Amino acid sequence: MRMKKRLAVLLAVLFLLAAVPAVVQAEDTWVLDKLEKDDVDLDPIPLLIIKINYDADGDGKDAYIEGIDAKTVRENGEQWTHTTDSYWSEMCFSDTGKSLKNYYETVSNGSFYFYPAEETYADASAQGSADDGVVTVTIPYEHPNSATGTVDTEDHLSRLAALEASDEYVDYASFDKNGDGYIDYTELAILFVCGGYEYSSTYNGSTRDQFSVHAHYTIGSGCELDGVMVQQSGKTGFVRVGEYGSSDEGLTVGTIAHELGHFLGAYDLYDTNHDGDSREWNYASDMSLMSSGSHNSYSGERSGSSPAYMDPYHSIMLGFIEEQTVTDGTYTLYSRQSEEGDYNILKINTPNPSEYYLIENRNGGTESEMFDAISSGATGIVIWHIDESSIAAGYINNEGSGHDPGIVVMGTRGLSVPYGFFYNEKAEESFYHFDSSIYKFPVSGTAYTKLTEEQASEFQLKIDILSERADEMQIKITGACVLPPSLSVYASDSTTSSLTFSATIGNLNGGNVTSCGFIFSSEADYTADPNAVIIYTKPDEAGNFSYTFEELEDNSRYYCTAFAEGSNGRSEKTAQGATQIVPTERGYYIAHLYMRKNDSNTSYDVKLEPGETIPDAVTRSMKKTGYVFGGWYLDEACTERFDLNSTQTECIDINLYAKWIEQDLAAELRIHNATSRYGMTFATEVGNTFAVPDITERYGYIFDGWYADEALTVKFDFAAVAENTEGVDIWAKWVVDESIPPETTATTQPPETTVTEPTSSEETSVSQTTDTDVVTENPGDNVWLIVIVAAAVIAAVAIIYILFHKKQKITK
């Protein structure tokens, strides 16, 4: 009997083990409590300043110096520079004082700055010297303000002429450090100083300074100099400013630092009031360089002499500072002037990972030798509210519902006060304690932007200030949300019999990780798969781990769930992957189109012969409620676009994946003077480029490119990224095809055919496809076909009629 009991227990254990996924356990134990970030910090970047004299009449003489009357100068658009080279080199590169170099060294904790680019230009009369980073050129063009009629529009012809003129003094090839033939933004920055005055300043010009430009950073066309491409879109942009900020002095450092912030990747934070509701919410106020803080100054200084520091969000984004994610507890915050510790930023999570708080110490005093001339009442602890969803939409603080509060200083009495939460020895009692629940954002009327009502009801952040205002201040945090480690996973490699999945722990969220790995399954829900396999691995110091699963079926889909577990709980993320298809000997190949219009993982299969392309009708059918089609991609992550004009010469099946973008996050390309082959153009996301549209041919004309303006003067650059969700308009240029005689009669277009796509429940396979997906018929053949079908129908009716009457006769 005892033996039978033991046998029963053993069988029960074996039964339980059979129901548990197979496990491969890592041998050693470990704790990951700090992530060693990959080296993404910016190295210092050389800056070339090009001052431009606009010699409109081409006589080589300054019209103002020559005494030409102002009206004549205004009419011909001539404008020369009059500041010294030394003014610009000292303001931008001096090791002392409030220079551009010192500003960026300060905000980056000493890791980054701009330094003078090497050049040979030396003009003693302008107090310039070789290698001071400043070159002055004279070009036979009118000022951009005169040429375009606006202060905002970029005149690319004169800019390129200035670049080419500077080549006499600059060896551009020497800046191509990686040898790829392009100058990218990490290799050289270029600042164009246009003669005249800066439109954004309080100075309105004079007889000497008749024209102005509005400072901006932009991406435009480039040119080849010294064998390398300079200012190639997609690689780098440029900054353009007006020369004078007052009647007797050049522009101050604040505007230049702001525009170079854009050059590095920072966003505008001021409200440009795009939706025209006559209200502006200055969420970041003068507390950030990327808002109105670029104009900050102390008493007695010119506007922009002491710009605000970079806000904490951008300091983190640009790699200047690494944030510390914290939970409940007591912490010390150091200002940038502290001698006891480096400036630091604390991050506090909410239940939604895209919504969180950043805390900094902005103590600094009112000394005129410092930057950051914020109000003395705004110094101390400053709390920022961050909404990354608004930031991802491309408009931050200036568009949409509530003007999209993406990077916001939490005001002491609500957002009507343009300063953040702070404490100093003169503060009122209300300043000692921060409670997130008392704040109400304008328009929405809530203290949150992305939390659900249920999440918000369970979250209440409180911060107590334990120190008087100083360069070192302690705070006590309660109510911080504890989130498990953030995690991402993707299929990084595949063969016909193996799949490799790679995962990354992005943020420990104030905790640690003691276990991580993968759960591999042929089912989307691994808990329903008794054959699922669990693999435990150990991450590297940066939080990366991967595993290759072998002996798999070819042309099969699998699911891999990465997990990471530690003191804050467990995270799981799932990715899909498919093994490659074993090539077979045949005269066609299958394009497996994963349309992703619903939750079905089935593909719509198109049989193609070498040389054939995906039928246009397939793409025309791509519509999904709430989304915009972004085109076909070769990978599931939609990183590599598929060219619909391409074809294969080998009979190897391919997988194509549809990309769908939420309407609110999509940037669309609007084409004019042309018709899309698919009845649409492919959308993109903010920060990504547009696909070149495929258009129908136009009889008697040859397509001659896409342009950014209706006048067809500026070519559109498809390497430029979408900056917001407003979309972009482009115009097609056509030239007459001289080889084709004039068309005298209207041409008959063949009828458009369609492709019937499978329903979500269909399991589409190769056997369901036909040899040809879209058949383009000859219009003449259609006529004969109609005649034949009609005759057949008439004959059939006649036969039925005769047989019917015969039957009646027999019956009678």
Image (tube, grey):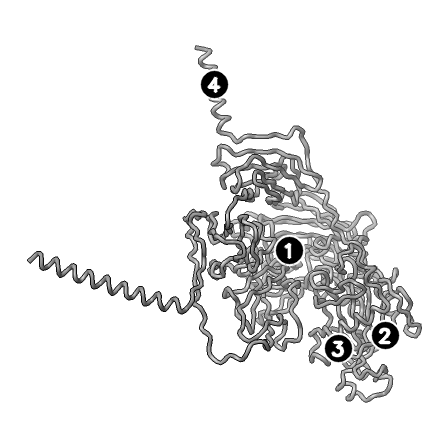
Q: Distance between the residues labelled 2 and 4?
A: 93 Å
What numbered label is drawn on residue 212?
3
Amino acid on which the number 1 mark rests in the picture: His
Q: Which of marks 4 and 1 is nearer the N terminus?
A: 4
Residue 437 rendering spot, x and y as whole percentages: 59, 53
Instruction: Identify residue for label 1.
Output: 385
Q: Which of marks 1 and 2 is nearer the N terminus?
A: 2
Instruction: Identify residue for label 4.
Output: 9
Position of residue 780 relative to residue 538, above or below, is: below
Q: Which residue lies furthest to the left in this view?
A: 812
Residue 97 rendering spot, x and y as whole percentages: 86, 62
Q: Tell us which disc is closer to us: 4 or 1.
A: 4
Q: Distance between the residues labelled 4 and 1?
A: 58 Å
Q: Which residue is drawn at 61% across and 60% down?
A: 686
Give the quadrant of residue 250: bottom right
Give the quadrant of residue 120: bottom right
Quarter of the image that includes the N terminus: top left
Instruction: Identify residue for label 2.
Output: 83
Q: Which residue is drawn at 63% across and 49% down?
A: 462
Position of residue 27 relative to residue 602, above or below, is: above
Kind of element beneath mark 1: strand
Kind of element beneath mark 2: loop
Q: Which of marks 3 and 2 is nearer the N terminus?
A: 2
